[in-house]
């Protein structure tokens, strides 16, 4: 049986193009916002509102996708909104309109996440989900390598010409949307929804979800609550003496490692168990954060970011594959959307908590606390091993 099907390839290419567009702008977004008058505080509020929008909408649209049995409209509109938001940011320079454009981008992510991951789950068997989700993550993250490289090349020739870069980012976004129209829903899965779907209806799923789902997602969310933004890792690298180009370079290096190992980690997870590979990833995270806490010399940051890329490859796709294996087929988008929604909120809180701890107690305490909590999450998963987390762990 063919594991990486045509549908998986197309969805992976869509994610690749979308991430190229997004990551072209990632290194320059704070610089651009400051150039049009945004303060650091306003940038923080903007990102907080945007991530909260994405987080809450993931659960709702995942639930709506399951109730209607439709996937592709959510995928197409989701990627379409994200593509549209890029040029809007270049032309709408007042704070209110920038908030509007950024929120559209995150709303697009909320629209597509649950439905897209449900399609990936439907294309795999329980024994191949690690490979399918791993391949998708690998292609997605490859975009996070190509995007910043394209941005660096452009800015080398056109320094501080930020607006044109936002317009150029529309091109890969349009390619992503175009690819999405190559996919169609399975006709037998489309159904008429019964009744309305309230915005917070996905919260009801938590109460009715399988016990294995609650135990798994509880551990994942505790980890997410102490897994702050990668910005803190880059800030630590900057403090250690890396210049701006080296900081961007080490971020690209991390994404390259992530992209290279996500699919092999998925293959390994299918062979030896999703749970084992996921916990190995958490242990790598613990090692990286302990290393960051003890202020390593600059050259060791490349070692730590290599291990950090391995951690991401072992956890991101594997977590979704694990969730989809322990939930009913009819609830896949809801289950993943609910988890992704709660994860977004926890990630927002994590960065706020990390910022406060960094300010009050220093960088070392920030990283040590995250490492300790992550190690405790590993113990949690080992302690509850006698309970059933579902087949093909």
Image (cartoon, rainbow, N blue to C red):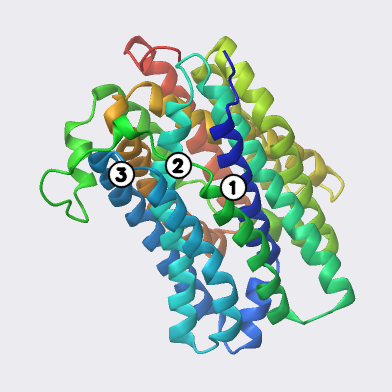
Cβ–Cβ under 8 Å for marks 3 and 1: no
The location of residue 176, given as percent across then percent down, is: 59, 54
- Please, what secondary structure does the residue beneath circle 1 have? helix
The location of residue 197, given as percent across then percent down, is: 17, 51
Q: Quadrant of residue 220?
A: top left
Asked whether residue 306 is in view, the answer is: yes
Q: Quadrant of the N terminus?
A: top right
Instruction: Quickly name the residue at label 1.
Output: 15
- Please, what secondary structure does the residue beneath circle 2 have? helix
The location of residue 205, given as percent across then percent down, is: 21, 38
Whether residue 195 sits left or right of residue 316 in the image: it is: left
Relative to the observer, which residue lies in front, 60 or 176? 176
The location of residue 224, given as percent across then percent down, is: 45, 44
Asked whether residue 240 is in view, the answer is: no
Which numbered dot is residue 282? none
For image coordinates 68% across by 77% down, the residue present is: 31
Mark-to-mark CA distance, 3 and 1: 19 Å
133 shown above or below 243: above
Instruction: Quickly name the residue at label 2.
Output: 116
For image coordinates 66% across by 59% down, the residue present is: 172
Q: Using a 10 Å C-alpha cutoff, classify the residue at mark 1 as few (fewer than 14 neighbours), some (14 to 19) or many (20 or more).
A: many
Instruction: Quickly name the residue at label 3.
Output: 65
> How many circles with numbers are drawn on the protein?
3
Q: Earlier in the sequence, mark 2 or mark 1?
A: 1
Q: Quadrant of residue 300?
A: top right
Q: Earlier in the sequence, mark 3 or mark 1?
A: 1
């Amino acid at each position: 049986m063919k594991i990486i099907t045509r549908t998986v390839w197309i969805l992976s290419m869509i994610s690749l193009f979308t991430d190229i567009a997004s990551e072209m702008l990632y290194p320059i977004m704070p610089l651009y916002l400051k150039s049009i008058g945004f303060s650091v505080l306003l940038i923080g509020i903007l990102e907080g509102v945007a991530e909260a929008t994405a987080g809450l909408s993931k659960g709702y649209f995942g639930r709506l996708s399951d109730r209607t049995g439709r996937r592709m409209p959510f995928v197409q509109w989701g990627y379409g909104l994200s593509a549209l938001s890029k040029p809007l940011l270049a032309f709408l320079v007042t704070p209110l309109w920038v908030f509007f454009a950024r929120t559209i981008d995150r709303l697009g992510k909320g629209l597509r996440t649950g439905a897209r991951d449900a399609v990936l789950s439907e294309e795999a068997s329980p024994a191949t989900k690690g490979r399918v989700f791993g391949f998708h993550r690998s292609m997605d993250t490859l975009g996070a390598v190509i995007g910043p490289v394209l941005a660096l090349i452009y800015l080398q020739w056109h320094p501080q010409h930020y607006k044109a870069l936002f317009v150029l980012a529309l091109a890969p976004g349009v390619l992503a949307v175009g690819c999405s129209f190559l996919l169609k829903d399975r006709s037998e899965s489309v159904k008429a929804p019964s009744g309305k779907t309230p915005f917070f209806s996905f919260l009801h799923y938590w109460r009715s979800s399988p016990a294995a789902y609650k135990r798994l997602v509880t551990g994942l969310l505790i980890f997410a609550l102490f897994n702050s933004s990668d910005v803190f890792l880059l800030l630590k690298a900057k403090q250690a003496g890396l210049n701006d180009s080296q900081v961007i370079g080490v971020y690209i290096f991390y994404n390259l490692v992530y992209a290279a190992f996500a699919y092999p980690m998925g293959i390994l997870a299918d062979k030896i168990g999703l749970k084992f590979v996921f916990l190995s990833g958490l242990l790598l995270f613990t090692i990286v954060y302990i290393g960051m806490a003890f202020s390593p010399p600059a050259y060791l940051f490349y070692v730590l970011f290599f291990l950090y890329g391995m951690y991401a490859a072992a956890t991101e796709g594997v977590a979704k594959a694990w969730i989809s294996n322990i939930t009913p087929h009819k609830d896949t988008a809801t289950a993943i959307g609910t988890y992704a929604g709660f994860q977004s909120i926890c990630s927002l809180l994590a960065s706020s908590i990390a910022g406060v701890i960094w300010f009050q107690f220093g960088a070392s305490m920030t990283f040590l606390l995250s490492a300790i909590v992550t190690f405790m999450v590993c113990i949690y998963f080992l302690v509850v091993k006698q309970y059933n987390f579902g087949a093909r762990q």
